[in-house]
Amino acid sequence: KQRKARTAFTDHQLQTLEKSFERQKYLSVQDRLELAAKLSLTDTQVKTWYQNRR
């Protein structure tokens, strides 16, 4: 089974994720979906980034 490729976040995506994380350490599903859509990422990518960041 092949592993998923590691996501290379852009500077803009990382800045936005970090700002969002400073405001709230845990995202609701709705907030997560909105952030993912805004950054052109999947819900799972945002969820995983948050988990790793915590």
Image (tube, grey):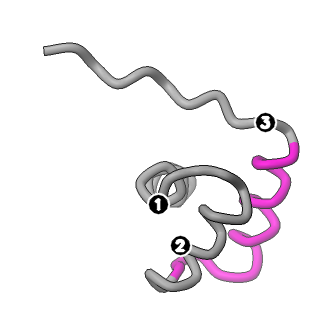
Mark 1 or mark 3: which comes first in sequence? 3
Give the residues drawn in magenta, as a range.
12-27
> Residue sitting at 74 percent across and 72 percent down?
20
Quadrant into which the N terminus falls: top left
Q: Earlier in the sequence, mark 3 or mark 2?
A: 3
Type of the residue with mark 3: Thr
Secondary structure of the magenta portion, mostly? Answer: helix
Q: Residue 34 colored magenta?
A: no
Residue 15 in the image, given as x and y percentages of width and height: 85, 53
Distance from Cα at disc 1 to Cα at disc 3 = 16 Å
Which residue in the rendered view is the most extreme toward the left? 1
Secondary structure of residue under mark 3: loop
Residue 29, above or below 10: below
Mark sitting on residue 33:
2
Q: Position of residue 27 (x, y in %)?
A: 53, 79
Disc 2 + disc 1, Cβ < 8 Å: yes
Residue 18 counted in the magenta span: yes
Residues at circles 3 and 2 in contact by the CB criterion of under 8 Å: no
Residue contact at pointers 1 and 3, CB within 8 angstroms: no
* Label 1 packing within 10 angstroms: few (<14), some (14-19), many (20+): some
Q: Does 52 sit above or below residue 17?
A: above
Which residue is drawn at the image coordinates 81% and 67% (left, top)?
19
Name the residue tied to disc 1. Answer: 43
Q: Which mark is residue 52?
A: none
Side of 4 where 25 appears, left or right: right
Place of residue 51 in the rendered image (x, y in percent of width and height, measured from the top left): 45, 57
Residue topped by disc 3: 10
Q: Residues within 10 Å of mark 2 (few under 14, many from 20)?
A: some
Residue occupying image coordinates x 28% and y 19%: 3
Q: Secondary structure at mark 1?
A: helix
Q: What is the spatial separation of the Cα atoms under label 3 and label 2, in whole angstroms?
A: 18 Å
